[in-house]
Image: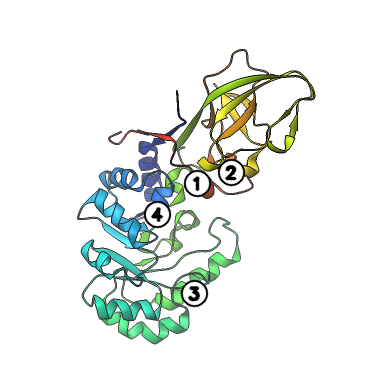
Amino acid sequence: MGSATLSIDLEAIIANWRALDAVSAGSVETAAVVKANGYGLGAGRVAKALARAGARKFFVAIAEEGARVRQALGPGPEICVFAGHMRGDTDMIYDLMLTPMINSLDQLTRHLEALPTHKFGLQLDSGMSRLGMDPGEWAAVRDIVSEQSPSLIMSHLACADEPDHAMNAQQLAAFCQMTDSFDAPRSLAATGGILLGQDYHFDLTRPGVGLYGCLPFAKAKPVVGLSLPVIQTRALEAGDTVGYGASWTAKKPSRIATVSAGYADGLIRSMGNKAQLFSNGTPCRLVGRVSMDLLTVDISHLDETPKSLDILCPEQGVDQLAEYADTIGYEILTSLGARYTRRYIGAGG
């Protein structure tokens, strides 16, 4: 076993999409967010699996991501670009039939001048202060936009992963105030917004991280597994230290496994001396700092030396691993490195 193996369960992604789709009642369409290379798991493979399951609308961050998804899907499904119509993207948007989510007056002008008959959506800022037109900008162009029949009017929630946060209701009210009398499909909810209830669903929902097995969708099926090969083992005496900075010292005779993966593979340095790996369900503590290519793990309590240790597995999901690094599951997923051997399970393999 030469390289670490990242297992990606496409059937679990499909099951999570269907489960989130079922939460949205009636005629609400459920899209899929596959930005950041499908949250690190391969946008083409993920999008193709979801398209076979029935997804017809996909969201990416930038036009270049849209090009890769279009190559995987071919014509037919709609691919929407959160960044909108950026300078230099006109040919790509036109040739690949991408739908920009227009974010500003400059983008709107660029789009209507360069591609006056090409489909577009519009993003409004309902309080997150990140992307989209604010209420004043929207009021200035609302009548012009109405004549162009945009395919979608959307916004994004800042605190949807905290159901009781006051920002949720504030943004819902702001979005309704800006759009209630506007004749176009609307979208406000990503994964967290879907779980807030049908008041947030409107015409289209856009699940992202929940598809990939992460919070805030607590009922999500786990999607990823990561198994790391053991390169070498070493016997330590009490007082021996491990790794850079000698940050861990053996208190008794110990057996340490050196494992092939590190922060270059997305296993974040701050999880050193805290994270756990597993051998057939038995926890083994990561000791010492995370190196660029290597981890060191205390396997003193195991009867035999394992050929590999699991860091993402049934006993430890992405969100649990993220806690050791004081981060969120999103960062763990999108950081998973290119050196892993990727094994796809289901939906065509």
Q: Which residue is mark 3?
A: 174
Q: Which residue is mark 4?
A: 35
Q: Where does residue 54 sit, x and y in percent of width and height?
A: 27, 48
Q: Residue at x 65, y 20 (%)?
A: 234
Residue 70 to residue 150: above or below: above
Question: Label 3: few (<14), some or many (≥20) within 10 Å?
Answer: some
| Tag nearer the camera, 1 or 4 | 1
Q: Please, what secondary structure does the residue beneath circle 3 have?
A: helix
Q: Earlier in the sequence, mark 3 or mark 1?
A: 3
Is 255 displayed left or right of 225 in the figure?
A: right
Q: CA distance from mark 2 to mark 4?
A: 21 Å
Is 166 displayed left or right of 157 in the figure?
A: right
Q: CA distance from mark 1 to mark 4?
A: 13 Å
Q: Where does residue 62 sit, x and y in percent of width and height?
A: 37, 61
Residue 335 disc label: 1
Q: Nearer the viewer, residue 50 or 104?
A: 104
Q: CA distance from mark 3 to mark 4?
A: 26 Å
Please name the amino acid that badge 4 sits on.
Answer: Lys
Residue 268 disc label: 2
Quarter of the image where one finds residue 303: top right
Residue at the top extreme, as displayed: 303
Please name the amino acid that badge 3 sits on.
Answer: Ala
